[in-house]
Image (cartoon, rainbow, N blue to C red):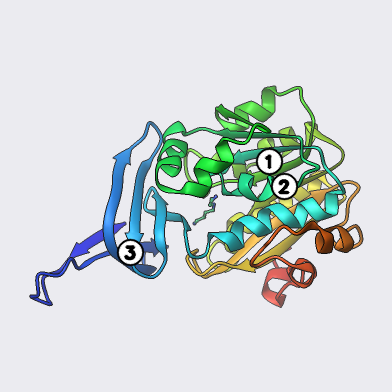
Amino acid sequence: MSFAMTHAEKEGFWNLWFSELHKGHVGMTYKVKSILYSGQSRFQRIDVLDTHEYGKMLVLYGSVMFTEKDEFVYHEMLSHVPYFAARSPASALVIGGGDGFTLRELLKHRTLERLTLVDIDEMVIEKCKEFFPDSKASFTDPRVTVEFADGAEFVRRSDRQFDLILVDASDPVPPADVLFKPRFHADCKKILAPGGVFAAQTESPFYNPDVFKEVFSSLSDLYDVCMPYLTWIPTYPSALWSFAFCSDTRHPLHDFDREAFLESGIGARWYNEDIHVASFALPTFVRQML
Ligand code: SPD
């Protein structure tokens, strides 16, 4: 991450830019209105920036986790694609997702009676609640329980079963790198209820093909149905982003409950019945990675 203050305009303007570098030689740059918070938790550097184009954003270890302008795409796709194929799940486990936006999407579904969120970094949750009203609202819902724990440890030790397990990880760097590993995937499968669906964010197949291939190799060993789906997130590296849909009993297209979606009134801004289906269409270069 680099902050570059330049006085080139000589107007006394606040001329601060934040750049996220992808692979060290390409990146995305944002003009910053103000730095709302900068600090260090036990696990990572945390920045909350207010930017001109994308509104407020959360940056962890120099990587954009979400922005106010485009976070709806990611969180709707991580939540509603598995939900509408799982058929009336009652319980959900979210690993990571300390911003609360995946919870916000899941809470739109009345069938979900119990939602458990496990995030390792309490400070991320506190800062999101402080700066993002939607985040605060998610954590006040009585259906939600929060545990501050290592997600990999939690699933290893849990004896509960969940109808939906969603992995809303940051990136495959510490502390979240374990959430991309076969051991974690196998432990999640043990606590997935019969008929359940597991979904995870699986990075950019364009910029991070090795992680994409390793994760799908690991998951396809575990599940009868293991399919990537894609979306567009302008502030993530390459904007082409992937997720995994996994289940032993549910197929994301054959078991997609279109009627349930059309009657749901969830007020999604990206997700709809056509996007659900289309997101499983893969470009040839992605097919070739599988
Ligand atoms: N490189 C950014 C990847 C971030 C993926 N997860 C974001 C979590 C937001 N809930």
On residue 19, which mark appears? 3
Q: Identify the secondary structure beneath mark 1.
A: helix
Q: Kindly report which numbered mark, 2 or 3, lies closer to the viewer in this rendering.
A: 3
Question: Cα distance, mark 1 to mark 3?
Answer: 32 Å
At label 1, the amino acid type is: Pro
Please state the horizontal and vertical placement of residue 13, each as a whole percent of the image: 15, 70
Residue 182: assigned label: 1
Q: Of label 2 and label 1, which has the lower sequence position?
A: 1
- x, y (%) of residue 94? 65, 40
Tell me the distance, in whole angstroms, between the alpha carbons under discs 2 and 1: 5 Å
Q: Give coordinates of residue 52: x percent, y percent.
A: 34, 68
Q: Are marks 1 and 3 in contact (CB under 8 Å)?
A: no
Query: Which residue type does callout 2 highlight?
Result: Ser
Tag 2 residue? 218
Q: Of callouts 1 and 3, which one flags the residue occurring earlier in the amino acid sequence?
A: 3
Q: Residue at x 81, y 44 (%)?
A: 222
Mark 2 near mark 1, Cβ–Cβ under 8 Å?
yes
- Depth check: give the residue in front, 280 or 87: 87
Q: Position of residue 147 (x, y in %)?
A: 58, 27
Distance from mark 3 CB to nearest ligand 1 atom below 8 Å: no
Depth check, front residue: 287 or 227 = 227
